[in-house]
Image (spheres, rainbow, N blue to C red):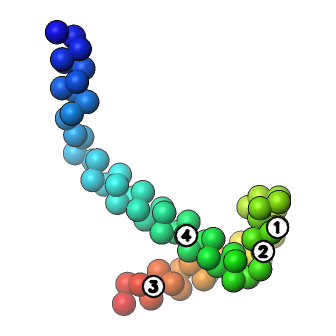
Amino acid sequence: MENQNNNAKKLRRSPNQNVRRSKNKQADLIEDLKMEIATELGIMEQINNKGWNSLSPRLSGKIGGKIAQRLKNFGK
């Protein structure tokens, strides 16, 4: 009987489940843009070797600015 209750609970969806899915899609889109822009800037080797934390604030700002521009263009 307990097993059936646990299965029923797993099948129920929370009201925020669709919100989480859309946030995950948005996060994936931003992550893809970030990687694409880093490749365009020629810094993927540095990121692969040392990680995102190794970037200077200037480079991070460039990436963020380009992401904002592209997201704005997607909205149009």
Q: Considering only order in the chain, which callout, 4 or 3, is on the residue closer to the N terminus?
A: 4
Badge 1 is on which residue? 46
Where residue 2 appears, x then y in whole percent? Answer: 21, 10
Within the image, what quadrant is residue 41 found in? bottom right
Where residue 1 appears, x then y in whole percent? Answer: 16, 9
Discs 3/4, front: 4
Alpha carbon separation for disc pair 3 and 2: 24 Å
Tell me the amino acid under the disc marked 3. Answer: Lys
Picture disc at residue 62:
none
**Circles 3, 4 touching at the beta carbon (< 8 Å):** no
Alpha carbon separation for disc pair 1 and 4: 17 Å
Alpha carbon separation for disc pair 2 and 4: 15 Å
Q: Is residue 8 visible?
A: yes
Q: Residue at x 24, y 20 (%)?
A: 6
**Circles 1, 3 touching at the beta carbon (< 8 Å):** no
Q: Residue at x 35, y 52 (%)?
A: 20
**Circles 1, 2 touching at the beta carbon (< 8 Å):** yes
Badge 3 is on which residue? 72
Tell me the amino acid under the disc marked 4. Answer: Asp
As helix, strand or loop, the secondary structure at mark 4 comes to helix
47 horizontally vs 36: left or right: right
Badge 2 is on which residue? 43
**Circles 3, 2 touching at the beta carbon (< 8 Å):** no
Discs 3/2, front: 2
Badge 4 is on which residue? 32
59 horizontally vs 1: left or right: right
Quadrant housing the C terminus = bottom left
As helix, strand or loop, the secondary structure at mark 1 comes to helix
Q: Alpha-carbon neighbours of circle 2 within 10 Å: few (<14), some, or many (≥20)?
A: some
Discs 1/3, front: 1
Within the image, what quadrant is residue 15 found in? top left
Where residue 9 appears, x then y in whole percent? Answer: 22, 27
